Each structure stands twice: as structure tokens, then as C-alpha cells.
Amino acid sequence: MWSPTQLALVREAGIAGNSISAGLTALRKANYAAHGIYSNAFFCLSIGMERTFKLLYILDYLLDHNKYPTDADLKTMGHDIEKLFLYSRTIQTRHKINRGPKAIDDNSLEYLIIKFMSRFAKSTRYYNLDLIAGSIKSGKSVDPIADWYINIGKKILEKHMTEQQERKIKENAQSIDTAFGHLMSVSFTAEDGTPLSDAYSASYQTGTTEIVRKYGTFYSASICRYLYYMLRGMCRNCQANGHDVPYLEELFFPFMNSDKYLLSIKTFPPQSQ
């Protein structure tokens, strides 16, 4: 039978794990014709990452002080996901945690995604409402979907879209435009805000978006794999020091897998708790 504190830890891990699963699944399906899916992905991923990083902070505090942190202690961490990630690096060093198969370097796409999620959590998650209400804040912030595509998506395309892939995407777009362009009216907006007003541009954007969402999901899942290994290591350290901490990493199992698996999966199953 779990104590109230143990149950709260398990439930918090469940919230984080399920939020991440939902976010990764949404990100894998996001496209310019359904911008709401992007927003859902960003909300779920930023919430899941923040809460997991805070679980690491809680376990670190427990090891260092032999007690759980206060509400005031937790509030000092705020919603700054980049700050929380950097703190987790100190946890990894101090407690000699196995970070998993891949480090998150400062110049990696994973780190760019962490910085993006931090911007979203701190300032752009209410971008649309701020814009509608004429908030000064909206004038200083960027549409998060455009931010994602410009700062993450374009770098993914530079790294992963081969000349052969781009040629095939262009040929397919031209074929669709030739066959159906004169029969359809196209009115969409690309992720970066560019109007898509013909069959060619819409088809080309569809092709490149598939590459962005595949690798955007992969790199986001790679961050979550790091969180799995960190959480597992901290739980083991707490248990070894006499603290009755549940096996919280069990709620993050889908993220422990290989690069090949994380690249292939399109739906991340929800966790049991």
C-alpha cells in the first residue's frame, strides 16, 4: 500500500509520462492544415518535460536534505525548461547517473527543442489570446508554430532532407499541380506564415512537413529518453539510501528505446497510471 507521498509521486510521473506520450503523438501528426495539433503537441510536451524535470529536482533534494522540498522551493524552479534541464545536468554529474545512449550537447537539435519548449512555457503558450487582446507581450513574441518551423524545422530539413528526397517532393508537387491545379482552390498558411495558394506549394509543403515531423518527434523523444534514464537513476539512488521511492521510470518505458524504434513509431501509447 502506497503512502500519500508515494501515490503523489506515482501520479505526478503518470501525468508527465502521459503528457509526453500525447505530445509526441500529436507532433508526429501535425501539419499546416491543422495548426491546433501543433499547439496541442507543444502544450503536452512542455508540461510533461517540466513536470519530469521537477521530479528530478524533488528526488535530488530528497537525497541531499533527507526530506522533500517545500512548495516555496519548487516555485523557485519556475517554468523555465532550459533552466530545469541545465540543473538536471548538475544532478547527473553529482550523482553519477547514466544519462542513456546519447548526450544532449549544446549545439544539438535536442537542445534547440529544449530552448523552444522553454520559450513556449514562459511566454508564447497564450500567443493567440495575447494577440487577440492586443497585449504588448504578443508584439514581442513570435507565433510558436512559426518559431518551431523556423528554428527547428528548417534545421531538420538542412540536416536530413537529401537531394533525392527534395527532387521527389518537387516532382510529386508538379504532377499534382499539373493534374489537379486547375480544378482546385487552395488557401492554407504554412507553418512559417507563408501563404499556400496553389496545388504545387501545398503539395511541396506536405512533403517537407513529413520530414520535419518525423525528425522533430524523434529528437523530442530523444530528450524524453534522457529523462527516462535520469529518473531511473535517481529512483535507484533514493532507494539505495533508504527512501521508499516508487519505480517512477516505469511510466516512461516507451522512451527508453533505440533511435531506430523512436524514428519508426507514430503513436506513443498512454501509460497505465
Image (cartoon, rainbow, N blue to C red):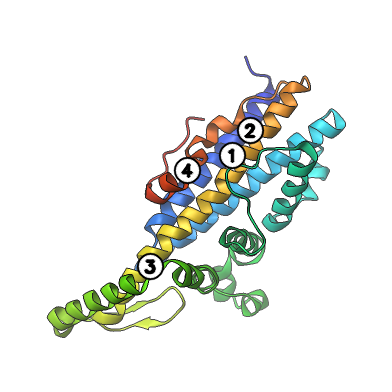
Q: Is residue 26 left or right of residue 142?
A: left
Q: Give the percent coordinates (x, y) of residue 193.
A: 45, 79
In this rendering, which labeled residue sits more in front, label 1 or label 4?
Answer: 4
Q: Amino acid at mark 1?
A: Tyr
Q: Residue at x 56, y 44 (%)?
A: 225
The residue pinned by badge 4 equals 258
Residue picked out by circle 2: 232
Give the alpha-carbon distance from disc 3 to disc 1, as whole Å. Answer: 28 Å
| Residue 173: quarter of image | bottom left
Dot 4 and dot 2 residues touching (CB under 8 Å): no
Amino acid type at image mark 4: Ser
What secondary structure is found at the residue carrying circle 4? loop
**Residue 112 in the image, given as x and y percentages of width and height:** 60, 64
Q: Nearer the viewer, mark 4 or mark 3?
A: 4
The quarter of the displayed image where residue 238 is located: top right
Q: Residues within 10 Å of mark 4 (few under 14, many from 20)?
A: few
- Label 1 vs 4, first from the N-terminus: 1
Is the residue marked by circle 3 packed among few (<14), some (14-19), or many (20+) residues within 10 Å? many
Image quarter of the N terminus = top right
Residue 206's x, y, as percent? 32, 70
**In the image shown, does 254 or 130 lie closer to the viewer?**
254
